Amino acid sequence: MRLSTIFITLSLIASIAVPPFLDLGLQFTLITALTAALFATAFNLLAGQAGMLSFGHAAFFGLGAFGVLHLMQVVERGFGVPTVLLPAFGGLVGLLTGFAFGYFATRRSGAYFSLITLALAELLHVAAPRWTSLFGGEAGISSMRMPSLGVTFGATIEVYYLTLAWFLISVGALYYLSRTPFGLLILSLRDSEERVRFMGYDAERSKVLVFAISAMFTGIAGGLAAMAIETANFSIFAMHTSAQAVLYTFVGGTAVFMGPAIGAIVFTLFAYWVSNATAAWLFYQGLIFVLVILFAPQGLGGILQTHYRARHQLDWSRLALPYVLYALGMAITAFGVVFVVHSIEILFASSYRLAAEVEGGLPAYEMFGRAWGPLAPLTWGAPIFALVVGIALMRRSRRNIALVWADTREERVEARNLDVEEKRT
C-alpha cells in the first residue's frame, strides 16, 4: 500500500473517531477548519490551477451563506428540504453568481482581473448593510437548524459530521475534476492561454466556467459556515475573508492539491490556540505568511510532496542532524520573537500605563514565570541573543541541508543518464 494512501486512510479514521472525545470549543474549531479548507481548495482551483488570482472570493462565500440562511428560514416555516441538503443551495447560489461575476471579471487578466474581483466583492460589502430585505442590514439575518432524517442537528458534533461529509464530497469532486481532460485544460489556461485557443478551445468560456465552478464550491463552504453559526451579516463580504483564502492557499502550497486545505487547517488551529494566549496572534499569522513566501514559496504541501517524492533517494542519516539543528534554531528564534512582541504588547497596554502612573516609574512585568525590568539589559539582551543564535544555527543547518539535497539531485541525474544509456544499448 502506498504511503499516501495510508496517510489519507489514517487521517479519515482520525477525523471520524477523535472529535466526539474533544470539548465543544475544539469541535467547533474543527468545523471552522473544514469549512476554511473547502474554501481554500475551491479558491485554489481558480488561483493555483487556472492561474487567475481572485481578491474577491468573499463574495461567493457570503452569498452562499446568505442563500442557505434564507432557505433555513423557509424550512423553519415547514418547507420540506432536508437539512443535510441545505449546503447544496449555497453551491447553486455560488454557481449562478459565479457565472455572472465571471463573465465580467475574466474579460481581463493579471492584475486587472484581481482588481475587478476585489471591486465586485467590495460592492457587495458596501451594499449589504443597506439591502435589508436580502442581507438583513447591519444586524444580518439568522435562523435555526431544523431536525431532519432522525437527526436533531442541535449538537455541535452532529454539525461537525455534516460538515465533514460535505467536505469529503466536495474535495473529492474537485480532485476528480483535476484528473479529467477539462482539468488538464484548466492547467493549460494557466500556462498558455494562446495555446488553448490554438488547440481550438474557447478560452473565454473556459475561464468563465472555471470561475463559476470555483464559486460554486466556495458557496458550499459559505453555506456550511452559516449552518454552523446560524447567522451572517455584511462583514462576511469584507476583504478579510478573501485575504484568508489567499493566506491559506499560498501557505499550504498552490502546486499540491491538498496544500490549501493543509494551510487552512493549520492556521485555523493556530488561531484557536494562539489567540487565547495573545492579542498579537494576527501578527504572528502574517509573519508566518511572509516567511513562507520568502523562504518556502512551494508552501507546506510542496515541502511535504518534495520529501515524499525523494524519500528513497535522500540520505536520511546525513539529513537527520541538520534537520534537528534547524528545528532547534527555529525554536530559539521563535522564543526571541515572542519575547520581543509580547514585551511590547505588555508595555503599550493601557493597564501597564496605568500601573506606571501609579508607581511613578516603569514597573517590572511578568513573563515566562519571572519578572523583567523594562530598562534592564537582560530584558532586551536575552531575546537579541536568542535571535542571533537561532538565525545563525538555521543558516548553518540550511547550508548542510542544501549540500545533501544537491548530492541527491546529482545522483538522480546520474541514474537517469545510466537508464538512457542502457536503453540505447
Image: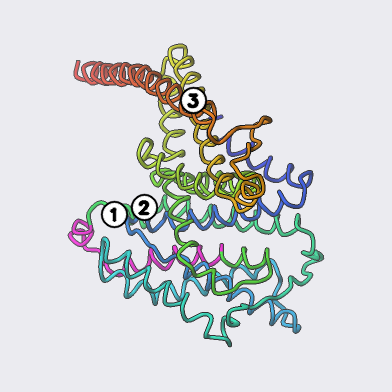
At label 2, counting other C-alpha atoms closer than 10 Å, the crowd grade (few under 14, some 14-19, many 20 or more) is many
What amino acid type should be assigned to the residue bearing mark 2?
Answer: Gln
Image quadrant in which you'd find residue 415: top left
Which quarter of the rendering shows the C terminus?
A: top left
Look at the picture and state if 147 lies above or below 155.
Answer: below
Query: Is residue 198 located in the magenta-colored stretch of the structure?
Result: yes
Q: Residue at x 50, y 24 (%)?
A: 327
- Name the colouring of the figure: rainbow
Residue contact at pointers 3 and 2, CB within 8 angstroms: no
Q: CA distance from mark 1 to mark 2?
A: 7 Å
Query: Label 3, on which residue?
Result: 386
Query: Label 2, on which residue?
Result: 49
Secondary element under disc 3, as helix, strand or loop, is helix
Residue farthest along the bottom direction in this orientation: 133
First to last magenta residue range: 193-221
In the image, taking residue 416 as reference, residue 302 lies left or right, namely: right
At label 3, counting other C-alpha atoms closer than 10 Å, the crowd grade (few under 14, some 14-19, many 20 or more) is many
Q: Residue at x 74, y 73 (%)?
A: 144
Instruction: Identify which residue, 22 or 206, lies in the foreground.
Output: 22
What amino acid type should be assigned to the residue bearing mark 1?
Answer: Arg
Which quarter of the rendering shows the N terminus?
A: top right
Secondary element under disc 1, as helix, strand or loop, is helix
Look at the picture and state if 221 lies above or below 402.
Answer: below
What amino acid type should be assigned to the residue bearing mark 3?
Answer: Ala
Query: Label 1, on which residue?
Result: 190
Residue farthest along the front direction in this orientation: 360
